Structures are given as C-alpha cells and as structure tokens.
Image (cartoon, rainbow, N blue to C red):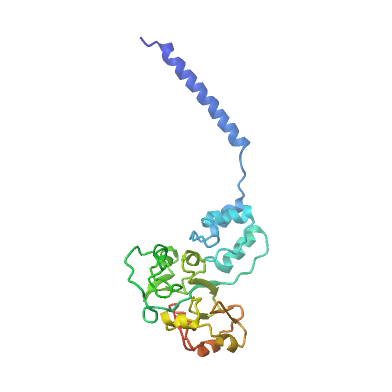
C-alpha cells in the first residue's frame, strides 16, 4: 500500500530541488548578465533587412553588432547607400565614412551568337556544379559566362536575369552588394563605380589568336585602347584590358578604337553593352 508519506516525500524533495535550481538560475542570470548596447538595436532598425551578406557579416543583425562591438565601418551596407551610412555614423557619434556607389558588371559579351559552345549542358542549372565538369565549362571560352543563373538565384534584389545565355544586370535594381561577384565560379562578374559607364566586356586571359578561335568579340590584348586613352585609365595585363573607373571620363575613345568591339557603354535600361558611342 502506498502511504501519504511515501508520495509526499518525493514530491517535497523534487519541489525543494526545483526551488534550489530556480534560485541558482536567478542568481546566475544576475551575476552573468551582459548589458546590451542600445545602439545595436537602433542600427538594426534602420538597416534594410535584405540580409544579402554584402557587408561581409551574416545578415543585418551581424552587421549591426559588428559596428557597435567589432569596430566595423559604417558604410558597408551597399543596399542602404550613403544616407544609411550617415545615419549609422550619427548613431555611433562618429564622422561619416565616404563611399563610392558601385554596381555589378558582367565581363563577357560572348553569347552563342559570338562564342562557340563545346557541348550542350543538360544537368543541374547551377554554374558551380557545371564548373566542376571536365573542361570547366560547356563554352569554348573557359573564362566566359556560363549562363546557368547561379548569380540570379543569389541576388535578393532581383537585379540579375539570364538573357541570351548571359547574365544581365539591371543597373536600376543592383545595389552593388557583391554577392553575385563572390558566387560566380568564373569570376566573370565584377563591381565597378556607377559613374564608370564604359567597360571591357571580356574576361579571357588568352593571347589574341587563341581568343579569336573561340570568340569573335573577345579582347585580344592589343593595347590600342590603352595607348588611345587620354585619361590613361586603361591598362593591359595578362592579355586583357582593364579600365580604372576612378580615372575614366567616359569619353568613348577606347570604344571607337577597339578592333575587337569588346569595349562599350553600359546601357542604363537593361545593363547590356552598346559597342558604339
């Protein structure tokens, strides 16, 4: 027979243990309480909430904490732009840090119309997956855009679409977070100042004769653009021309001089390249 004492004693023991552990937890919560800086919450409130990772932190929460507790710069949020950076600097009580608005740009114009294809890819629609295949790409040019849309999938701003087998960046939607640049296995996407309207749409490192075998509008590294640039904004390294956006005046001299027609103006409407001034 179960007696009252037999039932009450274990209950009393468990109750006493519960009270003891409760008191211990209450003491620990006070003893080890970490004061939260209110500036973290204030900064998080004005961040756009895109969680794109372009700032280098794991989302907006991580960036807000990084600013207050990690000494991160106040101008790393490309989605928020200059106004947000000024607001963060005001909360932190520091002088605002200057930043140059940038946008993503595709260093390739080698659509199927101009660049040969070695094979028809029939697999996972993912550039990283296709890049591990023998040869690294179904394209004859191993440096060009694969056009499988991995960059479009990671862009939380909907700024990238696939048009004619190439990634197309919408300059009106692109905030320059750089997520697509970090994702592209071919490094064919790059960030350029928004004011730099003239770009080299090629990523090949091959010599001119080899480029011409796989693409009709690839950079041949002739250097004519660099020699013609009045602003000295163009250099040729590794058989590939590159434009310094900080020096470029968008005069268009290189556009008219380029024999390969791989230099052009970024069109504001759809991010494509117009090869004539």
The quadrant of the image that shows the N terminus is top left
x, y (%) of residue 272? Answer: 44, 79
Q: Is residue 23 above or below residue 180?
A: above
What residue appears at the point 60 percent right and 82 percent down from the top-left corner? 233
Q: Nearer the viewer, residue 142 or 190?
A: 142
What is the quadrant of residue 244 in the picture? bottom right
x, y (%) of residue 72? Answer: 62, 58
What residue appears at the point 32 percent right and 71 percent down from the top-left corner? 120
On the rendered structure, is 103 left or right of 130?
Answer: right
Q: Nearer the viewer, residue 217 or 119?
A: 119
On the rendered structure, is 233 left or right of 15?
Answer: right
What is the quadrant of residue 216 in the picture? bottom left
On the rendered structure, is 150 left or right of 237?
Answer: left
Q: Is residue 76 above or below residue 116?
A: above
What residue appears at the point 45 percent right and 17 percent down from the top-left corner? 10
x, y (%) of residue 82? Answer: 58, 68
Regarding residue 28, the answer to whether it shows in the image is yes
Q: Nearer the viewer, residue 86 or 180?
A: 180
x, y (%) of residue 43? Answer: 58, 57
What residue appears at the point 54 percent right and 65 percent down from the top-left corner? 80
Q: Is residue 224 above or below residue 184?
A: below
Regarding residue 251, the answer to whether it shows in the image is no
């Amino acid at each position: 027979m179960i007696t009252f004492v037999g039932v009450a004693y274990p209950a009393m023991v468990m109750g006493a243990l519960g009270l003891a552990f409760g008191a211990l937890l209450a003491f620990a919560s006070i003893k080890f309480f970490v004061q939260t800086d209110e500036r973290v919450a204030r900064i998080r409130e004005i961040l756009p909430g895109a969680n794109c990772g372009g700032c280098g932190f794991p989302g907006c929460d991580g960036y807000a904490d990084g600013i207050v507790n990690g000494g991160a710069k106040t101008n790393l949020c490309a989605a928020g732009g200059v106004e947000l950076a000024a607001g963060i600097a005001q909360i932190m009580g520091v002088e605002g840090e200057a930043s140059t608005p940038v946008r993503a740009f595709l260093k390739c114009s080698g659509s199927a119309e101009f660049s040969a294809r070695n094979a028809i890819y029939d697999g996972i629609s993912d550039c990283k997956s296709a890049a591990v295949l023998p040869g690294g790409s179904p394209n004859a040019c191993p440096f060009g855009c694969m056009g499988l849309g991995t960059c479009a999938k990671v862009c939380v701003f909907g700024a990238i679409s696939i048009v004619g087998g190439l990634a197309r960046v919408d300059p009106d939607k692109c905030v320059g977070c750089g997520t697509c640049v970090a994702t592209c296995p071919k490094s064919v996407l790059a960030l350029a100042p928004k004011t730099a309207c003239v770009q080299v749409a090629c990523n090949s490192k091959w010599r001119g004769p080899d480029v011409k075998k796989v693409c009709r509008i690839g950079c041949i590294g002739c250097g004519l653009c660099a020699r013609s640039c009045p602003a000295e904004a163009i250099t040729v390294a590794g058989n590939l021309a590159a434009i310094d956006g900080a020096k470029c005046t968008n005069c268009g001299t290189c556009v008219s001089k380029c024999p390969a027609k791989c230099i052009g103006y970024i069109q504001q409407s759809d991010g494509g390249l117009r090869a004539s001034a």
